[in-house]
Image: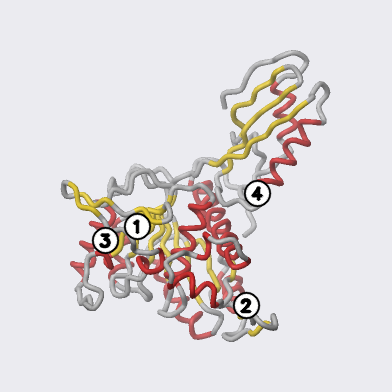
Protein backbone atom coordinates (compact mmCIF):
# COMPACT_ATOMS: atom_id res chain seq x y z
CA UNK A 1 0.00 0.00 0.00
CA UNK A 2 3.02 2.30 0.09
CA UNK A 3 2.48 3.48 3.71
CA UNK A 4 4.83 5.77 5.56
CA UNK A 5 6.43 4.87 8.86
CA UNK A 6 5.98 6.42 12.27
CA UNK A 7 6.16 10.20 12.31
CA UNK A 8 5.91 12.12 15.57
CA UNK A 9 3.22 10.96 17.99
CA UNK A 10 1.13 9.36 15.26
CA UNK A 11 1.85 6.07 13.55
CA UNK A 12 0.28 4.24 10.65
CA UNK A 13 -1.03 1.37 12.78
CA UNK A 14 -3.22 3.72 14.79
CA UNK A 15 -4.61 5.22 11.61
CA UNK A 16 -5.24 1.83 9.98
CA UNK A 17 -6.92 0.57 13.13
CA UNK A 18 -9.26 3.56 12.96
CA UNK A 19 -9.96 2.98 9.28
CA UNK A 20 -10.76 -0.69 9.87
CA UNK A 21 -14.23 0.46 10.92
CA UNK A 22 -14.91 1.59 7.33
CA UNK A 23 -16.44 -1.08 5.09
CA UNK A 24 -16.42 -1.30 1.32
CA UNK A 25 -20.14 -0.92 0.44
CA UNK A 26 -20.05 -3.72 -2.15
CA UNK A 27 -17.64 -6.27 -0.69
CA UNK A 28 -18.81 -5.81 2.91
CA UNK A 29 -15.28 -5.98 4.30
CA UNK A 30 -13.21 -3.25 5.85
CA UNK A 31 -11.05 -1.18 3.53
CA UNK A 32 -7.86 -2.01 5.42
CA UNK A 33 -8.09 -5.80 5.06
CA UNK A 34 -9.03 -5.31 1.40
CA UNK A 35 -5.86 -3.29 0.80
CA UNK A 36 -7.89 -0.28 -0.31
CA UNK A 37 -5.93 2.28 1.74
CA UNK A 38 -3.17 3.88 -0.32
CA UNK A 39 -0.74 6.80 -0.14
CA UNK A 40 -1.02 7.23 3.62
CA UNK A 41 1.09 10.20 4.68
CA UNK A 42 1.67 11.56 8.18
CA UNK A 43 3.15 15.02 8.64
CA UNK A 44 3.04 15.80 12.38
CA UNK A 45 -0.72 16.18 12.95
CA UNK A 46 -1.69 16.21 9.28
CA UNK A 47 -2.88 12.94 7.72
CA UNK A 48 -3.70 12.30 4.08
CA UNK A 49 -4.67 9.06 2.33
CA UNK A 50 -6.55 7.57 -0.59
CA UNK A 51 -9.22 4.87 -0.45
CA UNK A 52 -9.53 2.93 -3.69
CA UNK A 53 -12.91 1.32 -4.37
CA UNK A 54 -13.56 -1.30 -7.04
CA UNK A 55 -16.82 0.35 -8.12
CA UNK A 56 -16.37 3.66 -9.99
CA UNK A 57 -20.14 4.27 -9.92
CA UNK A 58 -20.43 3.90 -6.14
CA UNK A 59 -23.26 6.15 -4.95
CA UNK A 60 -21.98 6.48 -1.38
CA UNK A 61 -18.36 7.46 -2.06
CA UNK A 62 -18.89 10.87 -0.41
CA UNK A 63 -20.26 9.16 2.68
CA UNK A 64 -17.22 6.86 2.82
CA UNK A 65 -14.93 9.89 2.61
CA UNK A 66 -16.72 11.60 5.52
CA UNK A 67 -16.74 8.44 7.65
CA UNK A 68 -13.01 7.87 7.06
CA UNK A 69 -12.12 11.47 7.91
CA UNK A 70 -14.21 11.36 11.09
CA UNK A 71 -12.63 8.07 12.16
CA UNK A 72 -9.09 9.45 11.86
CA UNK A 73 -9.98 12.82 13.42
CA UNK A 74 -10.81 11.04 16.68
CA UNK A 75 -7.16 10.04 17.15
CA UNK A 76 -5.03 12.03 19.56
CA UNK A 77 -2.60 14.34 17.83
CA UNK A 78 -4.55 14.63 14.56
CA UNK A 79 -5.05 18.23 13.48
CA UNK A 80 -6.08 17.77 9.84
CA UNK A 81 -7.33 14.86 7.71
CA UNK A 82 -7.60 14.70 3.93
CA UNK A 83 -9.20 11.59 2.38
CA UNK A 84 -9.45 11.09 -1.39
CA UNK A 85 -11.72 8.49 -2.97
CA UNK A 86 -10.42 6.79 -6.10
CA UNK A 87 -11.24 3.53 -7.87
CA UNK A 88 -9.46 0.61 -9.44
CA UNK A 89 -11.68 -1.76 -11.41
CA UNK A 90 -10.87 -5.41 -10.80
CA UNK A 91 -10.84 -8.27 -13.28
CA UNK A 92 -10.95 -12.05 -13.25
CA UNK A 93 -7.48 -13.31 -14.09
CA UNK A 94 -7.39 -16.64 -15.89
CA UNK A 95 -4.66 -18.43 -17.77
CA UNK A 96 -7.32 -19.64 -20.19
CA UNK A 97 -8.43 -16.13 -21.15
CA UNK A 98 -7.92 -15.57 -24.91
CA UNK A 99 -5.84 -12.66 -26.13
CA UNK A 100 -8.54 -11.18 -28.36
CA UNK A 101 -9.11 -8.38 -25.85
CA UNK A 102 -6.13 -8.62 -23.48
CA UNK A 103 -6.57 -5.16 -21.95
CA UNK A 104 -10.32 -5.29 -21.35
CA UNK A 105 -10.94 -6.01 -17.68
CA UNK A 106 -14.67 -6.78 -17.81
CA UNK A 107 -17.21 -7.68 -20.49
CA UNK A 108 -20.92 -7.02 -19.92
CA UNK A 109 -23.52 -8.57 -22.22
CA UNK A 110 -26.82 -6.69 -22.30
CA UNK A 111 -29.54 -9.09 -23.40
CA UNK A 112 -33.28 -9.62 -23.55
CA UNK A 113 -35.62 -12.45 -24.32
CA UNK A 114 -37.61 -10.45 -26.87
CA UNK A 115 -37.33 -7.27 -28.89
CA UNK A 116 -38.93 -3.95 -28.06
CA UNK A 117 -38.00 -3.81 -24.38
CA UNK A 118 -35.38 -1.05 -24.76
CA UNK A 119 -32.31 -3.25 -24.44
CA UNK A 120 -30.12 -1.07 -26.70
CA UNK A 121 -31.19 2.07 -24.85
CA UNK A 122 -30.14 0.45 -21.59
CA UNK A 123 -26.80 -0.65 -23.10
CA UNK A 124 -25.99 2.83 -24.44
CA UNK A 125 -26.91 4.53 -21.18
CA UNK A 126 -25.12 1.95 -19.03
CA UNK A 127 -21.91 2.52 -21.00
CA UNK A 128 -22.37 6.30 -20.78
CA UNK A 129 -23.10 6.22 -17.04
CA UNK A 130 -19.99 4.15 -16.32
CA UNK A 131 -17.91 6.54 -18.44
CA UNK A 132 -19.41 9.52 -16.60
CA UNK A 133 -18.05 8.06 -13.35
CA UNK A 134 -14.52 8.03 -14.77
CA UNK A 135 -14.29 4.46 -16.06
CA UNK A 136 -12.75 3.61 -19.43
CA UNK A 137 -15.60 2.11 -21.46
CA UNK A 138 -16.22 0.54 -24.85
CA UNK A 139 -19.58 -0.24 -26.47
CA UNK A 140 -19.89 -3.09 -28.97
CA UNK A 141 -23.10 -3.34 -30.99
CA UNK A 142 -23.52 -7.06 -31.67
CA UNK A 143 -27.17 -6.68 -32.71
CA UNK A 144 -26.36 -7.17 -36.37
CA UNK A 145 -30.03 -7.42 -37.38
CA UNK A 146 -30.98 -4.08 -35.86
CA UNK A 147 -27.83 -2.07 -35.10
CA UNK A 148 -29.19 0.98 -33.29
CA UNK A 149 -26.21 1.95 -31.14
CA UNK A 150 -24.83 4.49 -33.67
CA UNK A 151 -28.19 6.29 -33.62
CA UNK A 152 -28.49 6.17 -29.82
CA UNK A 153 -24.95 7.48 -29.31
CA UNK A 154 -24.80 9.84 -32.28
CA UNK A 155 -22.95 8.58 -35.35
CA UNK A 156 -20.96 11.74 -36.11
CA UNK A 157 -17.75 9.71 -36.50
CA UNK A 158 -16.94 6.55 -38.44
CA UNK A 159 -14.38 3.78 -37.81
CA UNK A 160 -11.02 4.04 -39.51
CA UNK A 161 -9.10 1.08 -40.99
CA UNK A 162 -5.32 1.12 -40.42
CA UNK A 163 -3.07 -1.84 -41.26
CA UNK A 164 -5.99 -4.28 -41.07
CA UNK A 165 -6.97 -2.92 -37.67
CA UNK A 166 -10.25 -1.13 -36.93
CA UNK A 167 -9.90 2.13 -35.02
CA UNK A 168 -13.27 2.64 -33.30
CA UNK A 169 -14.79 6.09 -33.13
CA UNK A 170 -14.89 7.67 -29.68
CA UNK A 171 -18.28 9.25 -29.10
CA UNK A 172 -19.11 10.87 -25.76
CA UNK A 173 -15.77 9.42 -24.56
CA UNK A 174 -16.97 5.87 -25.27
CA UNK A 175 -15.21 3.68 -27.86
CA UNK A 176 -17.79 2.18 -30.21
CA UNK A 177 -18.18 -0.36 -32.97
CA UNK A 178 -21.30 -1.46 -34.83
CA UNK A 179 -22.24 -3.26 -38.02
CA UNK A 180 -24.36 -0.19 -38.67
CA UNK A 181 -21.16 1.60 -39.71
CA UNK A 182 -20.41 -0.91 -42.47
CA UNK A 183 -23.78 -1.61 -44.10
CA UNK A 184 -26.18 0.66 -46.00
CA UNK A 185 -29.02 1.66 -43.68
CA UNK A 186 -31.65 0.19 -46.00
CA UNK A 187 -29.91 -3.18 -46.38
CA UNK A 188 -31.16 -6.19 -44.43
CA UNK A 189 -28.63 -8.58 -42.91
CA UNK A 190 -29.28 -12.20 -43.84
CA UNK A 191 -26.34 -14.11 -42.42
CA UNK A 192 -25.84 -17.69 -41.34
CA UNK A 193 -24.01 -18.76 -38.20
CA UNK A 194 -20.43 -18.84 -39.58
CA UNK A 195 -20.66 -15.24 -40.81
CA UNK A 196 -22.07 -14.08 -37.48
CA UNK A 197 -19.28 -15.90 -35.65
CA UNK A 198 -16.66 -14.22 -37.85
CA UNK A 199 -18.22 -10.82 -37.15
CA UNK A 200 -18.01 -11.40 -33.38
CA UNK A 201 -14.35 -12.42 -33.67
CA UNK A 202 -13.53 -9.36 -35.80
CA UNK A 203 -15.30 -6.95 -33.46
CA UNK A 204 -13.36 -8.39 -30.55
CA UNK A 205 -9.98 -9.21 -32.03
CA UNK A 206 -9.51 -6.66 -34.82
CA UNK A 207 -10.84 -3.54 -33.10
CA UNK A 208 -8.32 -1.44 -31.18
CA UNK A 209 -10.19 -1.38 -27.89
CA UNK A 210 -7.06 -0.55 -25.91
CA UNK A 211 -7.25 -0.37 -22.12
CA UNK A 212 -10.86 -0.63 -20.90
CA UNK A 213 -12.48 -1.15 -17.53
CA UNK A 214 -15.72 -2.30 -19.15
CA UNK A 215 -16.79 -3.42 -22.61
CA UNK A 216 -20.59 -3.27 -22.85
CA UNK A 217 -21.96 -5.59 -25.55
CA UNK A 218 -25.46 -5.00 -26.92
CA UNK A 219 -26.81 -8.38 -28.05
CA UNK A 220 -29.75 -9.07 -30.36
CA UNK A 221 -32.91 -10.26 -28.59
CA UNK A 222 -33.46 -13.95 -28.09
CA UNK A 223 -31.11 -16.91 -27.86
CA UNK A 224 -29.39 -17.28 -31.21
CA UNK A 225 -26.06 -17.76 -32.93
CA UNK A 226 -24.56 -14.44 -31.83
CA UNK A 227 -25.10 -15.16 -28.15
CA UNK A 228 -23.60 -18.63 -28.57
CA UNK A 229 -20.61 -17.34 -30.54
CA UNK A 230 -19.88 -14.59 -28.03
CA UNK A 231 -19.97 -16.92 -25.03
CA UNK A 232 -17.75 -19.42 -26.83
CA UNK A 233 -15.25 -16.76 -27.96
CA UNK A 234 -14.58 -14.96 -24.68
CA UNK A 235 -15.43 -15.58 -21.02
CA UNK A 236 -18.02 -12.93 -20.21
CA UNK A 237 -17.89 -11.25 -16.83
CA UNK A 238 -21.67 -11.38 -16.75
CA UNK A 239 -24.98 -10.63 -18.43
CA UNK A 240 -27.57 -7.94 -17.71
CA UNK A 241 -31.12 -9.01 -18.63
CA UNK A 242 -33.57 -6.27 -19.67
CA UNK A 243 -37.32 -6.77 -19.47
CA UNK A 244 -40.54 -4.79 -19.16
CA UNK A 245 -42.85 -5.52 -16.19
CA UNK A 246 -45.43 -7.48 -18.19
CA UNK A 247 -45.70 -11.25 -17.79
CA UNK A 248 -45.00 -12.07 -21.44
CA UNK A 249 -41.68 -10.23 -21.51
CA UNK A 250 -40.62 -11.85 -18.25
CA UNK A 251 -41.47 -15.35 -19.47
CA UNK A 252 -39.35 -14.82 -22.57
CA UNK A 253 -36.57 -13.19 -20.54
CA UNK A 254 -36.36 -16.35 -18.44
CA UNK A 255 -35.25 -18.21 -21.59
CA UNK A 256 -32.33 -15.82 -22.02
CA UNK A 257 -31.39 -16.39 -18.38
CA UNK A 258 -31.50 -20.17 -18.90
CA UNK A 259 -29.28 -19.85 -21.98
CA UNK A 260 -26.58 -17.88 -20.16
CA UNK A 261 -26.63 -20.34 -17.29
CA UNK A 262 -26.09 -23.22 -19.72
CA UNK A 263 -23.17 -21.32 -21.19
CA UNK A 264 -21.69 -20.74 -17.71
CA UNK A 265 -22.11 -16.97 -17.93
CA UNK A 266 -22.96 -15.28 -14.61
CA UNK A 267 -26.19 -13.27 -14.51
CA UNK A 268 -25.38 -9.87 -13.04
CA UNK A 269 -29.06 -9.08 -12.61
CA UNK A 270 -32.31 -7.85 -14.13
CA UNK A 271 -33.37 -4.35 -15.22
CA UNK A 272 -37.01 -3.33 -15.48
CA UNK A 273 -37.40 -0.88 -18.36
CA UNK A 274 -40.56 1.17 -19.06
CA UNK A 275 -41.37 0.53 -15.43
CA UNK A 276 -43.91 3.36 -15.10
CA UNK A 277 -44.94 6.64 -16.68
CA UNK A 278 -45.11 10.02 -14.96
CA UNK A 279 -47.31 12.59 -16.66
CA UNK A 280 -45.27 15.73 -17.30
CA UNK A 281 -48.37 17.91 -16.80
CA UNK A 282 -50.08 16.54 -13.70
CA UNK A 283 -47.38 14.29 -12.26
CA UNK A 284 -49.76 11.33 -12.09
CA UNK A 285 -48.11 7.93 -12.28
CA UNK A 286 -49.43 5.29 -14.68
CA UNK A 287 -48.13 1.71 -14.61
CA UNK A 288 -48.81 1.09 -18.29
CA UNK A 289 -47.22 -2.36 -18.43
CA UNK A 290 -47.82 -3.20 -14.80
CA UNK A 291 -45.11 -2.63 -12.23
CA UNK A 292 -42.67 -4.63 -10.16
CA UNK A 293 -42.87 -7.77 -12.26
CA UNK A 294 -39.15 -7.84 -12.95
CA UNK A 295 -38.26 -7.29 -9.32
CA UNK A 296 -40.58 -10.10 -8.26
CA UNK A 297 -39.08 -12.35 -10.94
CA UNK A 298 -35.55 -11.55 -9.74
CA UNK A 299 -36.54 -12.60 -6.22
CA UNK A 300 -38.06 -15.86 -7.47
CA UNK A 301 -34.96 -16.58 -9.57
CA UNK A 302 -32.65 -15.46 -6.75
CA UNK A 303 -30.96 -12.93 -9.00
CA UNK A 304 -30.07 -9.29 -8.23
CA UNK A 305 -32.59 -6.63 -9.20
CA UNK A 306 -30.49 -3.87 -10.76
CA UNK A 307 -33.13 -1.14 -10.93
CA UNK A 308 -36.02 0.33 -12.86
CA UNK A 309 -36.21 2.89 -15.67
CA UNK A 310 -39.39 4.90 -16.31
CA UNK A 311 -41.11 5.30 -19.65
CA UNK A 312 -40.20 8.85 -20.60
CA UNK A 313 -40.56 11.16 -23.58
CA UNK A 314 -37.26 12.77 -22.59
CA UNK A 315 -35.39 9.45 -22.72
CA UNK A 316 -36.91 8.77 -26.14
CA UNK A 317 -36.03 12.26 -27.38
CA UNK A 318 -32.44 12.04 -26.14
CA UNK A 319 -32.09 8.63 -27.81
CA UNK A 320 -33.33 10.00 -31.13
CA UNK A 321 -30.90 12.91 -30.80
CA UNK A 322 -27.93 10.60 -30.15
CA UNK A 323 -27.26 11.94 -26.68
CA UNK A 324 -27.77 9.35 -23.91
CA UNK A 325 -29.92 10.49 -21.01
CA UNK A 326 -27.25 9.24 -18.59
CA UNK A 327 -25.05 12.16 -19.70
CA UNK A 328 -27.67 14.77 -18.77
CA UNK A 329 -28.52 16.20 -15.37
CA UNK A 330 -32.14 15.31 -14.69
CA UNK A 331 -34.14 12.81 -12.60
CA UNK A 332 -34.09 10.26 -15.42
CA UNK A 333 -30.29 10.23 -15.58
CA UNK A 334 -30.18 9.20 -11.93
CA UNK A 335 -32.05 5.99 -12.82
CA UNK A 336 -29.28 4.99 -15.23
CA UNK A 337 -26.61 6.06 -12.73
CA UNK A 338 -28.21 3.84 -10.10
CA UNK A 339 -28.21 0.89 -12.51
CA UNK A 340 -24.55 1.55 -13.40
CA UNK A 341 -23.76 1.42 -9.68
CA UNK A 342 -25.66 -1.87 -9.32
CA UNK A 343 -23.94 -3.45 -12.34
CA UNK A 344 -20.46 -2.33 -11.28
CA UNK A 345 -21.20 -3.54 -7.76
CA UNK A 346 -22.20 -7.00 -8.98
CA UNK A 347 -19.04 -7.16 -11.11
CA UNK A 348 -16.91 -6.28 -8.07
CA UNK A 349 -18.64 -9.04 -6.10
CA UNK A 350 -18.33 -11.54 -8.95
CA UNK A 351 -14.62 -10.83 -9.38
CA UNK A 352 -14.03 -10.95 -5.63
CA UNK A 353 -15.72 -14.32 -5.30
CA UNK A 354 -13.70 -15.64 -8.23
CA UNK A 355 -10.43 -14.64 -6.57
CA UNK A 356 -8.52 -16.69 -4.03
CA UNK A 357 -9.80 -14.56 -1.17
CA UNK A 358 -12.04 -16.58 1.19
CA UNK A 359 -15.74 -16.35 0.32
CA UNK A 360 -17.83 -13.70 2.03
CA UNK A 361 -21.50 -13.21 2.77
CA UNK A 362 -22.87 -10.54 0.45
CA UNK A 363 -26.56 -9.72 0.23
CA UNK A 364 -27.90 -8.65 -3.17
> Residue 198: image x %, image y %?
20, 61
Q: What is the number of the mark on residue 77?
A: none
Q: Which color scheme does this rendered protein use? A: secondary structure
Distance (Cα) linking label 4 and label 2: 25 Å
Q: Residues within 10 Å of mark 1 (few under 14, many from 20)?
A: many
Q: Is residue 120 above or below residue 349?
A: below
Mark closer to the observer (4, 1): 1
Residue bearing the label numbered 4: 25
Give the answer, above or below, for where 301 lies relative to 249.
above
Q: Nearer the viewer, mark 1 or mark 3?
A: 1
Are the residues tagged 3 and 2 within 8 Å (C-beta)? no
Q: Which mark is residue 200?
A: 3
Q: Nearer the viewer, residue 151 or 347?
A: 151
Packing grade of label 4 (10 A; few <14, some 14-19, many >=20) is some
Label 3: element kind: helix
Q: Is the C terminus in the top left, top right, bottom left or bottom right quadrant? A: bottom right
- Asked if the residues shown at circle 4 and circle 1 are in contact, with their CB atoms under 8 angstroms apart, the answer is no
> Is there any visible trace of residue 26 in the rendered image?
yes
3 or 2: tag closer to the N-terminus = 3
The residue located at (64%, 44%) in the rendering is 24
Residue under numbered circle 1: 176
- Find residue 282 and report its horizontal and vertical position in percent: 70, 83
Task: Determine which quarter of the picture holds residue 277.
Answer: bottom right
Pointer 2 or 1: first along the chain: 1
Identify the residue position indicated by label 2 in the image: 292
Q: Quadrant of residue 70?
A: top right
Indicate which disc, 4 or 1, sits on the residue closer to the N terminus. Answer: 4
Closer to the N terminus: mark 3 or mark 4? 4
Amino acid sequence: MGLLKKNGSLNEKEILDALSSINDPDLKQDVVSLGSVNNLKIDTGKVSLTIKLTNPACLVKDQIKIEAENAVKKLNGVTNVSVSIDFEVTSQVSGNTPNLIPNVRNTIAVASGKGGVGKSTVAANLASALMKCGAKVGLMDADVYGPSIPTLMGDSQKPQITENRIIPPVIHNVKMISMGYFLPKEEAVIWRGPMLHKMIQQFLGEVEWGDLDYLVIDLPPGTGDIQLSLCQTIPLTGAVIVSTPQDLALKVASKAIAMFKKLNTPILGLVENMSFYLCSHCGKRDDIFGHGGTQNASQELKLPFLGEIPLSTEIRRNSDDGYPTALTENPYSTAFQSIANSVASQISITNYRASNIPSIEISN
